[in-house]
Amino acid sequence: MKSKLDPLSMVAMAVTVISVSATAPLTAAASASPLAMAFWRNCLGFAVLGPLLLLLRRREVARVARGERSLLRREQWRPLVFGFLAATALALHFAAFMTSTRLTSVAMSTALVATQPVWQALIAAGQGLRVSRRTWAGLALSVVGAAAAGGLDIRAGGTALMGDLLALVGAVAQAGYTALSERSRADVSTPLYSTFTSLVCGLELLVVCWLAHIPLTGFDRSTQLSLLGLLVLPQILGLGSLNFALGRTSATTMSVLLLLETPVAALAAWWFMGQGIKPATVPGLLLIIVGVTVVVTSGVEQATAQQGRHRRTGTPPYPAYAPYTPQPPYTPQPSPTPQHLTFPHSVKRDPRVDWARHTEDESPTVTLTYHGAGAFDTLFLRMPHAAEEEPGLDGPTEALADHNRRR
């Protein structure tokens, strides 16, 4: 996707960064239990994503309700299990991250949870995927930065060290959420999947709060204002401006810009809460940001190089987690009477047809999330318009013709 850095796009990027950066300060300023805040955070997310889903994906919701989408078919139970596991990892992320904002500084919490791409690269390496040397270099920088920034907390111990560890747990949990999501949402649009995970995550946190006897009502005014701020800033303004910016710039650019959450959140915590930053932690925080930036950009360059090699050979890249495995190329025989071809509503659409439609300016291997919220326009396996197409004569015929022309 080509960038269009006009003034309106730059304003959208600034609004996105500022809105997302408000998450940690608003959580730290509240007096309610972090688990209660995490529960209401997901309830607010579902309250926003649910109406947007009904507005933007009415047909997909109707197909799922009627059982026409593969989400409810027998062969999709395994991806559905991965979806529940992903939602559980997301619940762990919210619980750990929001608790860490109370135990350590906002700057340390946001910087350590921003290492999620580093852990995601380690998970990919553990799955047997090749990781570039530049990625390992960025990982090393992040580890050194985390050790340097948390050195004072390690020597002091106590709640600050526990907060740092919980922030790292939150980063690992979000990386696990991303990895599990790749296994579960090959045939589901991003709005539907984000709404589903928010609902399951909220229900799981509700059970935890009920078992731990954590009150979910009777909050004071500061907590109510914090919950309202979480709804207006990261959930409405953040998600809306993020999707607008993704329509005009690349996901890579936004991923790097979202790393500004650490200094912006630290500045907000200092301005509104009087929470300062220890000078000894500044070099480590900067190393974390630089290391994560190297990991993000090196992963995109590697994906782009792979796409270029496949494009030169005429074979589009195809992910291993997709529901269909690539078959040897073949030349289909022309039908003697193509005008009489009919396609039933239950026909399975090979996602390789949609995968082959990506142009060289698009990077479908790049995903972009912040604290579990996925952008509606993020490319994954299928193009966003694919889920909106009604099955019938014209859709599959045109897709088959386009597929044959590319071969």
Image (spheres, helix red, strand yellow):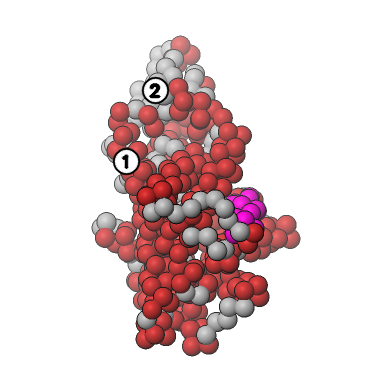
Query: Which quarter of the figure is the C terminus placed in?
Result: top left
Does residue 287 sit above or below 248 in this rendering? Answer: below
The tag on residue 347 is: 2
| Spot occupied by residue 395 in the image (x, y as percentages of width and height) | 50, 25
- The answer to whether residue 314 is seen in the rendering is no
Camera-nearest residue between 223 and 171: 223
Q: Nearer the viewer, mark 1 or mark 2?
A: 1
Residue 356, quarter of the rendered image: top left
Q: Secondary structure at mark 2?
A: loop
Write down the residue under mark 1. Answer: 81
Q: Residue furthest right?
A: 7
The span picked out in magenta is 223-241
Q: Amino acid at mark 2?
A: Val
Q: Amino acid at mark 1?
A: Val
Camera-nearest residue between 167 and 346: 167
Magenta region's main secondary structure? helix
